[in-house]
Amino acid sequence: MSYNILLCGVGGQGTVLASKLLAAAAEKKGETVHSAETIGMAQRGGPVTSHVRIGKDAYSPLIPKGKADLIIAFEPSEAVRNLDFLKKGGAVITNEICLKPVTESLNPTGYDGKEMIDYLTKIIDNLAVINADELCKELGSSKFFNVAVLGVAKGAGFLPFSEEDLLTTIETSVKANFVEVNKKAFLHGVEVGNGFGKK
Amino acid sequence: MKKEYVMGNQAIALGAIAAGVNLACGYPGTPSSEIVDTIAKRNKDKAIHVEWSINEKAAMEVAAGASYAGARCLVTMKMMGLNVASDALMSLAYVGVEGGLVVVSADDPGPISSQTEQDTRLFAKYCRIPVFDPSSVEEAYTMIQDAFEYSEKYKTPVLFRPTTRIDHAYGSISYDENAKPKEIPGFVKNSKRFVIFPRLSRMNHEMIEKRNPAIGDDFSDYKFNTFQGKAGNKKAILSGGAGYAYAKEYIQDRTDVSLIRVATPHPLPEKFLLNALEGAEEVLVVEELFPYLEEELLQLIGKKQLKIKVLGKHTGNSPLAGENTAEGVAAEIAKFLGENEITESSLSDNTIGENMPAPPMRPPVLCAGCPHRASFYAVKQAMKGRKANFSGDIGCYTLGNAMPLDMVDTCLCMGAGITMAQGLHWTDSETVNFAFVGDSTFFASGMTGIANAVYNEADMILCVLDNSTTAMTGHQPHPGTGMNMMGDVVNKISIEKILLGMGIEKVLTVNPLNLEEAQKAINECADTKGVKAIIFKSPCVALFKASEKCVITDKCIGCKKCIREIGCPAISAEDKKITIDTSMCTGCGLCAQVCPMGAIEKEVR
């Protein structure tokens, strides 16, 4: 089996933890896994990506363009920015809430994320658009989006792991007092994800 | 043995610990910083001496001393740090070592967060010492241990050069949790060996030139110099480092084309290469940065009078600058093999790639509440209407060049702002010359430049942006912070006392977040002859939780002066409505001091 997942967003959104959970889940299944973070100027509002590569034949540290099975985007324009990594027929999950560039106040571009979602809707068959605020409403904080979105990916049938794999990974990888809320976030995500399913 | 999923730099650290390293030192620099950080975190019973040295040259010399006593030593830096350390390393290459001494110099193709695209492999050849070039996290763990063995076997310092994609990649390694540092034999005095004199250099130079081909032969049997393919293949790919990972991604387990990987670029494993090239008529070289393997191969072909066509950077088959990519290398190899590269990208379908909306640019900016913003703004305001040059330096504060601050006119290398300001002064004494330097950079390479200014009677204003940390590379401590990598609380070295001790008479310390006070100090300095210094002292906002925040009151008339003047990422405007994102705001209050209507107030969080 070979499976490539690209997570993308803006610094501070929690993509790194999500990629570590995916890597740990793959390891638990006995898969060979590699990942790479392109963190760059993350702390200062720059785009970030995590490349998770599952399978023995993955040698390149980054996913080659056109080889990602799944893109999980924490921000709609970041989904579009990284779209050339997606393989034909690949799946995309994206948050629909946009994060304006930190320079927006100085150089307004009028960016609001809508045209990104419109474009993705037009061209991606396996697309799940979710609203992070709605998804996280009952969890009390949008901080849990990074784990909830993995649930969505699982529920929509985009992840090659069982629910069990991921839940035990959360138990062993997340700080003790955050395990329960993260499991709840994940399971809530699965429920939402079930509504999408593979086309 | 414990299995752990780790970052490449952590794998290098764990490999060094497994090799029984006694001393680990270096200077922070992306992408190398996590190595020393990791060793410090996993330093059981403080059995390893771990330090952030004040710069790379100091680190190299500390390690050389310990190595003479038989200790195993690891020195880490980014590749530009190797330029700083090269004075020590070049001589050390002649003298040699006793305990294994491995110098990690992390290269940064792209460059992603560096000033140059220099290649450590060339440096190894220049120094006449061995270099190891890992192509994965797992290899890096094993190879760093081999590097210590070879260093001791041949009594020479050894370079180890990972690249960003190895340093910041993750993979699984198994390591011994109970590894202990080696016994240190102790320094045995021998001035014939350890005191470098021309006679010793001449003698050792001869020895080194005789030894290197022998190391090359030794490397010919090294397990990471690998050949994949059928004997007599007419086409071969020669690669190393991350380049090998990209080539292997395309070739996989095919044997109809030879895939040759050189993990020890210097001294070149000639016997291995000649064997691997048996029958080859055409070779494509896949490597990053300098066409090193390509030129070595051309030289070998010339020396042996072989008839092999070499394709690579010199023939335009691959780019001379920038980072390799998996798809870029795939295209190069496909062309070389006359194959149709299969691209599966969803965007390659013509109907889809069109009309793609452009994602917004996200240029990096100084954080909301960053005290550097306030320091730059104060200098800018104070110098309104006067001719002034602003020499910048290396660190977060290079971002002071962005609009609307636009306060960095030059940036060259660590510490250069201070000396360049002097050079600018000697060309035009009417202009006020400022040099901005961070606290860590000040200790690393700022002090000599200041002594130079005082001695040569330059006119300049030194602005030390003191946020009490090395922020850019991940908040490492330095001599001014009062903490070291052994976890000890130590005396802080006072920047103010250093400056006073050097004979600067006017040394002012101000809080940059108090705009009026800061501007007053700047004006006072601008009107005084000679070398003056202002220490802008305010801690990095990424290190603590803010206790205050700023809010906009109904006095706001929507003039947007706050946005136009300081460019804080927490402030945004929609039409005439100004809002402050309280999740980002640290309550620094700079905007409140800029607002002409007094419409911004501080609140307790």
Image: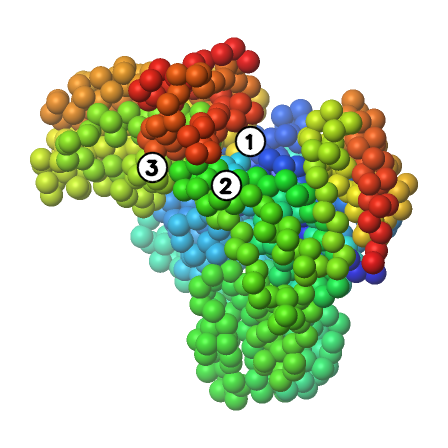
Q: Give the number of the disc on residue B404.
A: 3
Residue type at mark 2?
Answer: Pro
Lower position in the chain sequence, tag 3 or tag 1: 1
Using the image, name the chain to which the residue with label 3 belongs.
B
Q: Are marks 3 and 2 on the same chain?
A: no
Q: Give the number of the disc on residue A101.
A: 2
Using the image, name the chain to which the residue with label 2 belongs.
A
Residue position marked by numbered label 1 in the rendering: B50
Secondary structure under tag 1 reads: strand
Q: Nearer the viewer, residue B529 or B154?
A: B529
| Image quarter (top left, top right, bottom left or bottom right) of the N terminus of chain B | top right
Say if A59 sits above or below B317 in the image.
above
Tell me, yes or no, whether the two marked residues, 3 and 2, touch with CB atoms within 8 Å: no
Residue type at mark 1?
Answer: Val
Closer to the camera: disc 3 or disc 1? 3
Q: Give the number of the disc on residue B22.
A: none
Q: Residue A144 vs residue B355: left or right?
A: right
Tell me, yes or no, whether the two marked residues, 3 and 1, touch with CB atoms within 8 Å: no
Using the image, name the chain to which the residue with label 1 belongs.
B
Determine the image quadrant of residue A188.
top right
Locate residue B95, reporting x and y percent. 43, 49
Q: Residue at x 69, y 55 (%)?
A: A121
